[in-house]
Amino acid sequence: MRERLTDALYGLGWGTVKRLPEPVATRLGRGIADAAWKQRGKGVLRLEANLARVVPDASPARLAQLSRAGMRSYMRYWMESFRLPVWSRDRIRTGFAPEGLHHLQEALASGRGVVIALPHMGNYDLAGAWVTARLGVPFTTVAERLKPETLYDRFVAYREGLGMEVLPHAGGSAFGTLARRLRSGGLVCLVADRDLSSSGIEVSFFGEAAKMPAGPAMLAVQTGAVLLPVTLWYDRSPVMRGRIYAPIEVPEGGSRAEKAAAMTQQVADAFAAGIAEHPQDWHMLQRLWLADLEPRPSRPRPSESSGTEKP
């Protein structure tokens, strides 16, 4: 019953919010965010606990301020996502302004294939739609399996409508397809700051141990693709901002696992830099650091764990 209700609510969002004038949708999103923040539910409390690691010297009042801004940013993501299917191509082209675009353009021109790794920041669906609308480049991504299946189908249809190829995250089954796309010079985009497979790579993240997906780095190691970290954030304008970081090179020495570990740590460092600058736009309402996680059974073949993302 709960799953059917969730599916119906998302369907209502896509069916109703996209028809609202943009200022109305913006006000609605802010109102929902503020109401959720005032309820002090598990998600808000977890967001504040995560932000306390990002901004360790923040006072309780500052953390509350950041979490409220974080919920508003999170709801902006959802309001934009519900409305993206009716945005014009011009609106999408002007809706994102990344710094360091030359890194992506040069990587695509190299023909080696490109892996973009992102954290849960800003609106990566908008960034992906911008890539297809502005650069004319299709890409492949991975989505977490959701229940009920109809809800997962909604998200797949939504993202495919924006020009993405969407593969289900199911262990290592997507890895081979992603590798083939990269070997043919394609673009792969993976949200990669939270490992859902129990087979990720341990990194130091804001001074504490966490695990991040092995997929982005392993794909670069095995295929020779260019690995580019990207962070996203909002300012007070309707335009989302972003930064494309310099390529993370494959180390010359060491085993594949050692190379992937070193590269994943560099991805984590880039994420940390972007999150520290814009903590309110990091939408991490789940447990992330190992100290916060309950033990989970390990899964085999960590080399084939790909990046995952929230819906």
Image: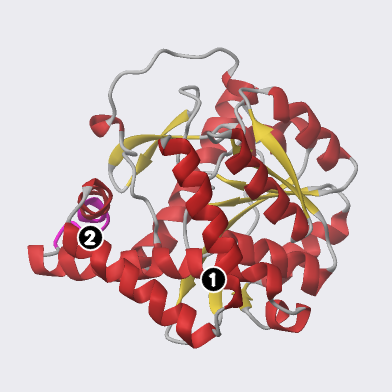
Residue 56 colored in magenta in the image:
yes
Residue 66 colored in magenta in the image:
no
Residue found farthest to the left: 60
Residue under the point 81% across and 47% down? 113
Image coords of residue 58 (percent x, y): 14, 64
Q: Which residues are magenta?
A: 51-57
Q: Quadrant of the N terminus?
A: top left
Residue under the point 57% across and 55% down? 11
Q: Residues within 10 Å of mark 1 (few under 14, many from 20)?
A: many
Residue under the point 60% across and 27% down? 305
Looking at the rendered structure, the secondary structure element under dot 2 is loop
Does 228 sit above or below residue 37?
above
Q: Which residue is mark 1?
A: 17
28 sits left or right of 149 in the view: left
Say whether residue 243 is visible: no
Asked if the residues shown at circle 1 and circle 2 are in contact, with their CB atoms under 8 angstroms apart, the answer is no
Q: Which residue is mark 2?
A: 55
Q: Splitting the image into 4 quarters, where does residue 22 fall? A: bottom right
Q: Earlier in the sequence, mark 1 or mark 2?
A: 1
251 sits left or right of 105 in the view: left
